[in-house]
């Protein structure tokens, strides 16, 4: 099923265009939504998740018109917001039962089956009797996934889920998401490029309420073959280089020198060395071109 | 640093609208309340009665104490919030890492918020100050401006209260980091006040000390102040007020200091209340293999029935959350305590202790508990509405496929279930108390109906309203504030003169009930009014549904846009239906209401003035007297109607011919009447039901005529019953009957006015009358009237009773009908009967004992009882709480039948006493009837009350009689505090001044007995009785009595008779010193010092007359037994005395027999 977004706009009371005539089409599979903080990702996610009203535009998922019939979407929706809390002093089991009721699982037996399965899947079975409000960040995110899975969703929206997770938790989290994404539409917003690289079959880069670029991660890097150059410079030379070249990123070496990555059709200078493009390059190029245009 | 925090916080507050709103609200409420009390909305008072000055220091303090309670809610809202907002917005995570000193942070915040609260509290003072100079105030109610009243109130009560409880609230919020705890603290303080009031009942000093707000403290000091004193005196600060303030201040300082010490700039609240479990090293599994995700197929159902089921399940989860929270449990527990204490007060109340019958449990205590339930509803409506948001779970919940109505109704349902739980707790508590007190008549049906039907509706409507307010007002605290204000505000509207049922939100009429008649016909109007408000509540709920916050709407515009999408056809249809229902019920209330003629006070005044102008000219027209009464009365209990037909014989007992007849018929009755002689109507006032008839031939002295009449009550309306005929428990009085003469608006005459002796105090149109009646009622009920039952028979499904008196009686009649049970007894050859409601048999024997006690004591000292029988007849408490005497009948209120007479706790046996008192009236009131002048009730009530005391003593012994005497003394002293007129001496007491006729009367005659001796006093009283027995005009006056007393007493006691009957004398005596020394010869020497101050009230003056009074001094042993009584004639104020005793006393008491009226007798006792 396809998620189609057309001409979606939203302006906040403080004048910020959070969404600006946004168009997007997302098919089954993992979709990465990449963008810096404040790009409008969360607004977009929340709007799709029926929690916010756009000023104008259309959203449809399969034959569901999301804005006209939000309830129909909610039935197939799994949503994990950027941050969330839970009722204090309630165990994972009890909370999941609560969500299962909200999600329309009528029979107690069915609820128990599903809850057992999602607890197993998210590796929370052992701590199911502990109150969720006392969970660590990773466990809480896993609980978020557990509640999301309860209604066997077709459209899953996860908003910056890996922020603050340790590497093991992150891997575990991404693995679960990957599994879900095989048969469903998953929208995964992040500002961490590696998440997208590891996970997504499709992606879009977003900033200032607009989609800057939509293509697969491989396409994005393939387009940059032979156009990324690196050079080792001293710290003081950075400003001069930035004036001359499109510097995408810079990173310190152990000897306190800098390695800069530059985007150029041809070798800019002799001491620039051609290197393999990565997704981060594509991300920065998209952002740079947006700010210069 | 301190000053920058202080000013920063203060400026922050000034930027938000709430302080201005609070100031404005308090200012307006106070202004309107003060202006209202000062008679701004009423016409100025007339006459020269002393009015309570509304701006005296005492009154300003009284009023401010009331507003102080509102101010207390500012403490969490401002002082608590000033700290809480750092936690709420998680600023504390950053802030607490700054180099701020604890002292600056805490003190800066506290003091800035405290300053603000104090400024807001000035709103009320300012309002009163400005209202004082408002034009149009009643000048009689307004004294001169006195700044001291304001200063005292603010400096001693208002500001210290804010400081004391502000510090406590601040501490609590700092501990728990929750604003709720601050709010709950305030609610707790209110409970503490209620609890201290009840727990220390009878010990004013302790209540004064422990009252958190010092409200009862001032009450304790001033409760015996007369109006004059209230108008002029400042509240003395030394003593109880000081101790109270110090006590609470200390407690508050300790709380604050502990908090201050323990307070740390930590991320989390100190976990002082949680037990730490043993620590454990936790390592999680960081490595894990891949998994396959395939969930078992389950069914998802969204049908309507499934949604309802979900709604029910969700409500249970919410209910679990409420039921487990300690705030709920704590408040429910305190609610139960409040019920226990209020009930304990009712069943131990000195003047009229009640048995814990179900109706009593369900009255005041249930009313209290309902208030608490409403409060809990307000709080938990807010908690539930904010629950997801507060936890941060709203986005998760809002994106699930659950309908808004399911979410909303699940919360409403949870609230309603919580209320049901509270009501169940109330019922269980009530039943437990009944069982504990040995009352085993469990009336579960009454509990169920009153709590789960009658009370529940009110609570449910509040649940709807709370959900609505918390939906509209996103700020939880503001929502609570609005709800509390609305609740109290609507409750106060009737006092402001707004009493339209259509406006008084969720304020149903009080359901008056009695065991005899159940709810009577109050139930249908109740349900109509509550149905009306229920429809309104449902409309509010529908609006809440439309405006339900789902997701993250940015502003009200967006919420309205969402509301439009929610407005489906079904919803709109439901809305229209509800509005229609609301309208129809409102209209029918309106129609029913206007059926009943409702006259305001000023209307009545106007009508009466017009009447007086036209008819006062007839006031002195001579009238014939009613000598024979013959009545046929038919009662229709089911439809609350009666019909009567009757005949009076009227005799011209005057010395002049009579030309005109003045007839006044009953207000609520429709009366037709005819005369046996030709007469023509000359004038008629149809509202006052008064007409003037001209006789064609004048009625010569000694001649008579017959007046026949037919009476029925005006038709009953839905809201108003126009007769006292009840389905069970009818009690009709003589006021249904036509009367003769102009008997309006006349003050009682002075006994020296000889025209006052023409009539007895009982009637102006009759002396003693002969009386016979046939009274009919439905089968199954017994109908009763004065006289002896001649016969009774059944006819056409109705039961007829024929009563006739064998001697002439006072023209005061009563007619009762109910399904009575009957108890019988005998005293010598006199038949004693009690007609009572089945189940009300707790006190029957005590009543019979009272009758017997009175018969034996009075027959011995006063001569024989004049009837062959005496019957006590129960009437429902809705008709009054009194008892009265009508020939051989004593109609007695249900209240006396369910009185708690368990005498092991030193209660006065009200059932015994009332029976004895009423029977004694056969001598004092019936055998001798006083003239219709001031002082009449001295003869009828004071002497009766004295005999009741003697009868009580003869039956129960002296200690219990002393208890009774002490109550009479308090009754007098308390009654004086509301006296608007100059206090008269006993011989000029007016009928309404019961505190004098009963309280001072019993006290005075009892003292007289101690001076003269019981036999001697009773003989003097008997000789007075015999002298005036059955005398018609001229009837005896109080002056006749006093001169009789003077003749019969020795000259040495002449001053006593004058002090007691002709003057108002109060003493202020004190036993200042008492020592005991062993005189070595088996004798003990007691040296005493005491002061005697005698004051006489003469008009507005108080003078100190010279002393030459006998004062008693009593010595008691350890068992409180009198071992030596000394009488001393005192001439000086300061006295020293040495007495020798042959036994070592344990204590000495000045005036142990309570012969001298003294406001304070606690300083007249010293233990050795």
Image (cartoon, coloured by chain):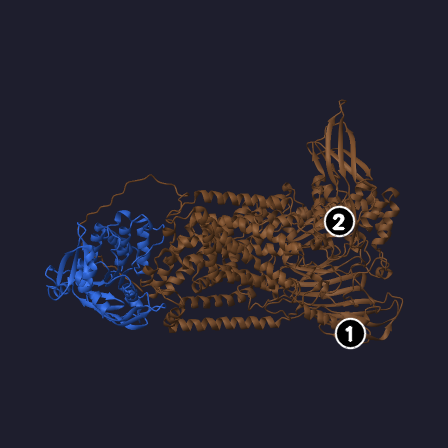
Chain colours: A blue, B brown
The subunit carrying tag 2 is B
In this figure, which residue is indicated by the disc labeled 1? B614
Image position, residue A226 (x, y; %): 10, 63
Q: Nearer the viewer, residue B413 or A67?
A: A67
Quadrant the C terminus of chain A occupies:
bottom left
Please report the residue visible at 54 percent of the width from the left and 63 percent of the height from the top.
B24
SS at circle 2: helix
Q: Residues within 10 Å of mark 2 (few under 14, many from 20)?
A: many
Q: Is residue B899 visible?
A: no
Residues marked 1 and 2 touching at CB (< 8 Å):
no
Image position, residue B274 (x, y; %): 39, 43
Quadrant the N terminus of chain A occupies:
bottom left
In this figure, which residue is indicated by the disc labeled 2? B1000
Indicate the quadrant where residue B284 lies. top left
Q: Is residue A176 visible?
A: yes
Please report the residue visible at 22 percent of the width from the left and 46 percent of the height from the top.
B285
Image position, residue B344 (x, y; %): 58, 47
SS at circle 1: helix
Do marks 1 and 2 both belong to one polypeptide chain?
A: yes
């Amino acid at each position: 099923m396809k998620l189609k977004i057309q001409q979606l706009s939203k302006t906040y009371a403080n004048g910020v265009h959070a969404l600006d005539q946004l168009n997007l089409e997302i098919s089954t599979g993992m979709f990465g939504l990449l963008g810096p903080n404040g790009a409008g990702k969360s607004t977009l996610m929340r709007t799709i998740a029926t929690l916010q009203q756009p000023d104008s535009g259309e959203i449809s998922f399969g034959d569901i018109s999301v804005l006209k019939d939000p309830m129909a979407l909610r039935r197939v929706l799994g949503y994990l917001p950027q941050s969330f809390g839970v009722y204090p002093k309630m165990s994972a089991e009890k909370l999941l039962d609560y969500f299962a009721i909200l999600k329309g699982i009528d029979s107690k037996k069915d609820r128990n089956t599903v809850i057992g399965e999602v607890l197993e899947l998210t590796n929370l079975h052992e701590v199911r009797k502990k109150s969720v409000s006392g969970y660590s960040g990773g466990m809480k995110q896993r609980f978020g996934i557990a509640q999301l899975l309860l209604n066997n969703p077709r459209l899953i929206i996860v908003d910056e889920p890996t922020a603050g997770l340790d590497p093991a938790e992150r891997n575990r989290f991404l693995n679960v998401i990957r599994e879900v994404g095989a048969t469903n539409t998953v929208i995964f917003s992040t500002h961490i490029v590696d998440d997208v690289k590891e996970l997504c079959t499709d992606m879009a880069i977003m900033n200032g309420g607009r989609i800057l670029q939509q293509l697969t991660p491989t396409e994005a890097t393939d387009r940059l073959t032979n156009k990324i150059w690196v050079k080792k410079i001293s710290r003081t030379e950075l400003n001069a280089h930035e004036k001359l070249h499109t510097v995408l990123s810079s990173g310190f070496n152990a000897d306190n020198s800098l390695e800069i990555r530059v985007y150029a059709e041809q070798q800019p200078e002799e001491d620039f060395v051609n290197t393999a493009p990565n997704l981060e390059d594509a991300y920065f190029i998209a952002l740079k071109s947006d700010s210069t245009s | 640093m301190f000053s920058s925090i202080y000013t920063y916080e203060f400026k922050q507050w000034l930027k938000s609208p709430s302080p201005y709103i609070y100031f404005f609200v308090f200012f307006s409420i106070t202004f309107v309340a003060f202006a209202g009390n000062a008679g701004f909305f009423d016409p100025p008072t007339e006459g020269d009665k002393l009015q309570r000055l509304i701006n005296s220091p005492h009154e300003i303090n009284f009023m401010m104490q009331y507003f102080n309670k509102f101010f207390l809610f500012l403490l969490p809202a401002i002082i608590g919030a000033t700290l809480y907002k750092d936690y709420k917005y998680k600023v504390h995570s950053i802030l607490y890492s700054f180099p701020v000193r604890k002292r600056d942070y805490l003190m800066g915040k506290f003091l800035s918020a405290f300053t603000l609260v104090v400024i807001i509290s000035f709103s009320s003072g300012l309002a009163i100050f400005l209202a004082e100079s408002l034009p149009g105030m009643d000048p009689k109610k307004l004294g001169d401006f006195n700044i001291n009243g304001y200063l005292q109130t603010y400096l001693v009560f208002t500001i210290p209260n804010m400081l004391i409880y502000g510090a406590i609230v601040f501490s609590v919020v700092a501990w728990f980091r929750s604003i709720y705890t601050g709010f709950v603290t305030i609610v707790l303080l209110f409970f503490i006040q209620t609890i201290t009031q009840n727990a220390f009942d009878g010990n004013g000093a302790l209540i004064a000390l422990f009252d958190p707000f010092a409200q009862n403290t001032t009450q304790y000091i001033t409760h015996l102040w007369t109006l004059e004193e209230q108008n002029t005196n400042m509240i003395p600060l030394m003593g109880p007020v000081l101790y109270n303030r110090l006590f609470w201040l200390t407690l508050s300082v300790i709380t604050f200091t502990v908090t201050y010490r323990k307070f740390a700039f930590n991320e989390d609240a100190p976990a002082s209340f949680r037990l730490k479990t043993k620590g454990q090293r936790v390592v999680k599994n960081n490595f894990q293999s891949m998994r396959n995700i395939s969930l078992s197929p389950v069914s998802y159902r969204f049908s309507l029935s499934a949604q309802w089921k979900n709604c029910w399940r969700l409500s249970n989860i919410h209910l679990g959350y409420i039921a487990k929270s300690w705030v709920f449990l704590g408040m429910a527990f305190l609610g139960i305590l409040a019920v226990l204490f209020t009930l304990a007060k009712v069943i131990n109340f000195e003047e009229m202790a009640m048995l814990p019958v179900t109706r009593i449990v369900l009255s005041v205590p249930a009313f209290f508990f309902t208030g608490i339930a409403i409060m809990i509803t307000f709080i938990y409506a807010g908690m539930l509405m904010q629950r997801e948001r507060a936890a941060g779970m709203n986005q998760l919940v809002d994106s699930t496929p659950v309908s808004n109505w399911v979410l909303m109704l699940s919360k409403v349902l949870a609230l309603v279930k919580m209320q049901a739980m509270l009501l169940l707790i109330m019922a269980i508590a009530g039943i437990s108390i009944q069982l504990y007190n040995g009352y085993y008549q469990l009336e579960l049906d009454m509990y169920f109906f009153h709590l789960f039907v009658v009370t529940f509706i009110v609570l449910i409507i509040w649940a709807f309203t709370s959900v609505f307010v918390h939906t509209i007002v996103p700020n939880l605290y503001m929502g609570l504030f609005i709800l509390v204000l609305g609740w109290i505000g609507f409750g106060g509207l009737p006092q402001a003169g707004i009493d339209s049922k259509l406006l008084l939100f969720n304020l149903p009429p009080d359901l008056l009930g009695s065991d005899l008649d159940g709810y009577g016909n109050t139930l249908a109007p109740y349900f109509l009014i509550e149905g009306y408000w229920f429809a309104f509540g449902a409309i509010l709920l529908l609006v809440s549904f439309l405006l339900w916050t789902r997701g993250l709407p940015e502003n009200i515009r967006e919420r309205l846009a969402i509301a439009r999408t929610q407005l489906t056809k079904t919803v709109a249809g439901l809305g229209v239906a509800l509005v229609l229902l609301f309208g129809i019920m409102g209209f029918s209330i309106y129609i029913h209401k206007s059926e009943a003629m409702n006259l305001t006070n000023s209307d009545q005044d106007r009508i009466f003035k017009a009447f007086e102008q036209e008819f006062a000219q007839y006031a002195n027209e001579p009238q014939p007297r009613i000598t024979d009464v013959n009545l046929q009365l038919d009662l229709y209990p089911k439809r609350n109607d009666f019909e009567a037909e009757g005949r009076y014989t009227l005799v011209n007992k005057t010395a002049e011919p009579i030309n005109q007849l003045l007839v006044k018929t009953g207000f609520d009755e429709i009366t037709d009447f005819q005369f046996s002689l030709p007469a023509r109507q000359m004038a008629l006032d149809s509202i006052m039901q008064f007409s003037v008839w001209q006789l064609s031939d004048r009625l010569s002295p000694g001649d008579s005529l017959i007046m026949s009449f037919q009476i029925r009550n005006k038709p009953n309306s839905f809201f108003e019953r126009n007769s006292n005929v009840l389905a069970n428990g009818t009690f009709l009085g003589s006021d249904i009957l036509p009367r003769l003469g102009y008997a309006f608006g006349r003050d009682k005459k002075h006994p020296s006015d000889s025209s006052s002796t023409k009539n007895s105090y009982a009637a102006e149109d009759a002396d003693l009358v002969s009386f016979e009646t046939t009274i009919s009622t439905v089968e199954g009920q017994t109908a009763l009237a004065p006289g002896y039952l001649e016969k009774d028979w059944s006819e056409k499904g109705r039961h007829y009773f024929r009563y006739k008196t064998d001697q002439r009686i006072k023209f005061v009649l009563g007619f009762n009908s109910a399904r009575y049970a009957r108890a019988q007894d005998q005293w010598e050859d006199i038949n004693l009967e009690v007609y009572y409601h089945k189940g009300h048999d707790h006190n029957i024997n005590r009543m019979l004992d009272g009758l017997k006690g009175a018969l034996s004591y009075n027959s011995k000292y006063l001569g024989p009882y004049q009837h062959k029988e005496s019957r006590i007849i129960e009437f429902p408490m809705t008709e009054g709480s009194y008892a009265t005497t009508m020939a051989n009948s004593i109609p007695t209120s249900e209240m006396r039948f369910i009185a708690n007479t368990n005498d092991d706790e030193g209660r006065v046996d009200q059932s015994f006493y009332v029976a004895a008192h009423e029977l004694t009236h056969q001598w004092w009131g019936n055998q001798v009837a006083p003239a219709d002048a001031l002082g009449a009730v001295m003869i009828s009530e004071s002497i009766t009350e004295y005999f009741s005391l003697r009868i009580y003593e003869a039956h129960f012994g002296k200690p219990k009689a002393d208890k009774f005497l002490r109550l009479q003394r308090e009754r007098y002293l308390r009654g004086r505090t509301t006296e608007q007129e100059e206090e008269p001496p006993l011989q000029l007491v007016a009928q309404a001044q019961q505190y004098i006729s009963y309280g001072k009367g019993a006290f005075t005659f009892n003292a007289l007995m101690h001076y003269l001796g019981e036999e001697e006093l009773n003989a003097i009283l008997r000789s007075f009785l015999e002298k005036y027995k059955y005398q018609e005009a001229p009837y005896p006056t109080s002056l006749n009595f006093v001169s009789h007393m003077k003749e019969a007493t020795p000259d040495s006691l002449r001053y006593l008779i004058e002090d007691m009957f002709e003057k108002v004398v109060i003493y202020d005596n004190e036993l200042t010193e008492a020592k005991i020394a062993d005189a070595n010869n088996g004798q003990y020497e007691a040296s005493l010092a005491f002061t005697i101050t005698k004051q006489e009230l003469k008009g507005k003056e108080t003078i100190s007359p010279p002393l030459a009074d006998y004062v008693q001094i009593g010595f008691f042993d350890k068992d409180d037994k009198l071992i030596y009584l000394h009488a001393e004639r005192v001439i000086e104020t300061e006295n020293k005395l040495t007495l020798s005793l042959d036994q070592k006393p344990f204590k000495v008491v000045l005036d142990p027999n309570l012969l001298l009226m003294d406001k304070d007798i606690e300083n007249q006792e010293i233990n050795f």
